[in-house]
């Protein structure tokens, strides 16, 4: 079985675990308080953590990381592409409104992660230009790119669908995902121009 098939098998298994967890309690991670989850040692993840995957990513600063390097604080995650002119600018504005709605001390303890599925054009340099154009602070905004297989794996884990057309544009799901400090999905918001308080409400218990 090749690496992509293995990744997709893992994705199906992890998604099944996530759905089971949501059915029990969307905000619970084995009854461990948020304060304790935030201090969980890196690499020691539950079977519902996205940080188990071994995919490698490149930041807009050309640093090589794994998703597990994001562990330690909640993350608000968006899959997008920088050349999008319709949905992505609205979604990114939604993330900026979420950031603005957090109290300053809360904002410093939340990460915002943008993951491109335009693997050909969203190079680190292109993402660096995007960061500058949107004035995204380096302190807690991470922009990532990777190869097609790793992007497909993460999209499957997040339940994001995308397809490129002949003009190089992407039709894609509009999903904002909240991960807790150990990489478990605790909430997903679908749609555009959403109320930022919906995400803020989900983040607050993770920051106590």
Image (cartoon, rainbow, N blue to C red):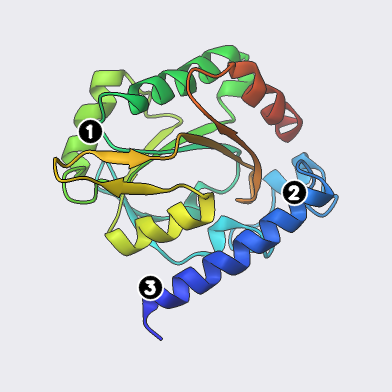
Name the residue carrying label 2: 22
Above or below, 55 against 181 in this view is: below
Q: How many marks?
A: 3
Q: Which residue is mark 1?
A: 128
Label 2 packing within 10 angstroms: few (<14), some (14-19), many (20+) = some
Q: Is residue 89 left or right of residue 129?
A: right
Residue at horizontal 76 percent and vertical 43 percent from the top: 26
The residue that appears at 53% across and 65% down in the rendered structure is 11
Cα separation between marks 1 and 3: 28 Å
Mark 3 residue element: helix
**Separation of disc 3 and disc 2 at Cα?**
26 Å
- Could one spot residue 115 in this view of the protein? yes
Q: Determine whether, in the image, residue 30 is placed left or right of residue 99.
A: right
**Residue 194 location (% of width, % of height):** 55, 19
Contact (Cβ within 8 Å) of mark 1 with mark 3: no
| Mark 1: secondary structure | helix
Q: Which residue: 62% across, 57% down? A: 49
Q: Earlier in the sequence, mark 3 or mark 2?
A: 3
Image quadrant holding the C terminus, namely: top right
Q: Position of residue 110 (x, y in %)?
A: 57, 31
Q: Earlier in the sequence, mark 1 or mark 2?
A: 2
Return the disc, 1 or 3, that comes first in the chain's sequence.
Answer: 3
């Amino acid at each position: 079985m090749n690496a992509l098939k293995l990744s997709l098998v893992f994705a199906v298994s992890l998604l099944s675990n996530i759905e089971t967890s949501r059915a029990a309690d969307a905000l619970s991670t084995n009854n461990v308080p948020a304060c304790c989850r935030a201090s969980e040692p890196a690499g020691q993840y539950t079977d519902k953590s996205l940080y188990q995957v071994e995919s490698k990513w490149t930041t807009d600063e050309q640093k090589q990381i794994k998703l597990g390097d994001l562990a330690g604080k909640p993350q608000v995650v968006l899959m997008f592409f920088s050349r999008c002119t319709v949905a992505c600018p609205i979604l990114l504005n939604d993330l900026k409104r979420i950031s603005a709605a957090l109290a300053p001390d809360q904002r410093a303890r939340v990460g915002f992660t943008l993951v491109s599925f335009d693997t050909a054009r969203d190079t680190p340099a292109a993402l660096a230009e995007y960061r500058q154009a949107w004035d995204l602070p380096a302190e807690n905004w991470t922009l990532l790119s990777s190869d097609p297989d790793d992007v497909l794996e993460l999209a499957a884990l997040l339940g994001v669908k995308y397809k490129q057309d002949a003009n190089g544009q992407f039709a894609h799901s509009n999903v904002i995902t909240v991960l807790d400090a150990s990489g478990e999905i605790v909430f997903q918001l679908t749609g555009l121009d959403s109320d930022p308080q919906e995400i803020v409400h989900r983040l607050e218990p993770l920051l106590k």
